[in-house]
Image: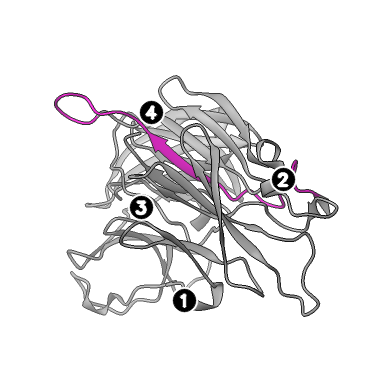
């Protein structure tokens, strides 16, 4: 068991990107806020390509955030972060007690913080006696509510029988989604063969990537809005530092970039100004992909400990 104020069992991050609009066309959001499992928020300037601030929410809101008792917990202090872009509010679920109940269940609360100052606004109740941390959902009026994990049924695949051009029910696995686009692994006869495709749930089409480089499903990433696919090229399961970019609409290769700095770092997010962000601990690297992206959030059910990404004009 580790101190909840300092450590998290795994990185569960949320990237909130904020910016301002210009007279003609909204500028690309500039700042990213990375929320970790132990309730630390790092502020990144994606234009300058560096971390400019860090907020320890456990330390700044110690009495409200840390459970009473020995102030140590087994697990995260911040589960399932959600950002309300219109209201400038960050929500996540945190334990309400350091220890589990006698039946093994736990108690949780919803915490609400204001952005960008990351001040605690209030705490809200969550359903009692939960076997897993509940999720936060925002209603039509943007009010938050906690939803038990047992009430959520994750979608792990798409029925491609209605998708052109072949309308074939190919077995698949969802890697990431953004807007109407879904990055898929199409299962082949050989388990060692990795076939990637992008489905458009609105147009009902599926486009395979043409001759993708060697990689793994966890090294393939969809941009916000789903216009491009970024692949970390790997050999023998290790990243090479080569990044391949594909057009999601055609499946064709667009560009290849080499960046040695990301070889030993984890992918974090693609931000709208066209940079891919990588991290190792509290250190970040930025790779310019030389193309702007959309602003829809990206969900990654295949890797739940990776960041969720939200965008705002704050």
Residue 68 can be seen, yes or no: yes
Which element type, helix, strand or loop, lies under badge 3? loop
Return the x and y of residue 312 as percentages of the image width and height. 34, 39
| 277 in the magenta segment | no
Label 3 Cα crowd, 10 Å radius (few <14 / some 14-19 / many 20+):
few
Q: Of 236 and 21, which appears nearest the observer?
A: 21
Q: Is residue 117 above or below residue 250?
A: above
Label 1 to label 2: alpha-carbon separation: 34 Å
Residue located 28% across and 42% down the image: 294
Which numbered tag is attached to residue 63?
2
> In this view of the protein, can residue 263 be seen by the observer?
no
The disc placed on residue 30 is: 4
- Looking at the rendered image, the quarter that the C terminus falls into is top left
Confirm or deny contact between disc 3 and disc 1 (CB under 8 A): no
Instruction: Give residue 211's mark.
Output: 3
Q: Is residue 280 above or below residue 144?
A: above
| Residue stretch in magenta | 3-26
């Amino acid at each position: 068991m580790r101190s909840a104020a300092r450590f998290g069992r795994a990185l569960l991050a949320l990237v909130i990107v904020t910016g301002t609009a210009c007279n003609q066309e909204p500028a690309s959001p500039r700042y990213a806020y990375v929320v970790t499992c132990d309730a630390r928020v790092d502020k990144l300037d994606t234009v300058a390509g560096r971390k400019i601030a860090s907020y320890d929410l456990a330390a700044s809101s110690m009495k409200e955030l840390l459970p009473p008792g020995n102030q140590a917990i087994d697990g995260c202090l911040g589960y399932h972060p959600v950002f309300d872009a219109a209201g400038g509010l960050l929500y996540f679920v945190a334990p309400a007690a350091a220890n589990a109940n006698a039946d093994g269940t736990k108690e949780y609360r919803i915490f609400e913080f204001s952005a960008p100052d990351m001040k605690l606004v209030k705490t809200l109740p969550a359903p009692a006696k939960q076997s897993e941390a509940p999720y936060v959902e925002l209603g039509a009026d943007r009010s938050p509510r906690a939803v038990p994990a047992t009430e959520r049924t994750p979608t792990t695949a798409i029925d491609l029988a209605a998708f052109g051009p072949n309308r074939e029910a190919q077995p698949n696995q969802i890697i990431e989604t953004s807007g109407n686009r879904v990055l898929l692994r199409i299962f082949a006869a050989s388990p060692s063969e990795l076939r990637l495709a992008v489905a458009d749930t609105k147009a009902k089409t599926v486009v395979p990537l043409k001759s993708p480089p060697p990689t793994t499903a966890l090294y393939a990433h969809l941009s916000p809005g789903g216009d491009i696919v970024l692949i970390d090229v790997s050999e023998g399961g290790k990243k090479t530092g080569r990044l391949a970019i594909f057009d999601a609409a055609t499946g064709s290769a667009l560009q290849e970039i080499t960046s040695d700095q990301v070889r030993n770092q984890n992918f974090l997010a693609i931000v709208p100004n066209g940079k891919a962000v990588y991290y190792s601990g509290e250190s970040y690297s930025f790779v310019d992909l030389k193309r702007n992206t959309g602003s829809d959030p990206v969900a990654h059910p295949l890797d739940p400990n990776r960041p969720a990404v939200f965008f705002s004009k704050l």
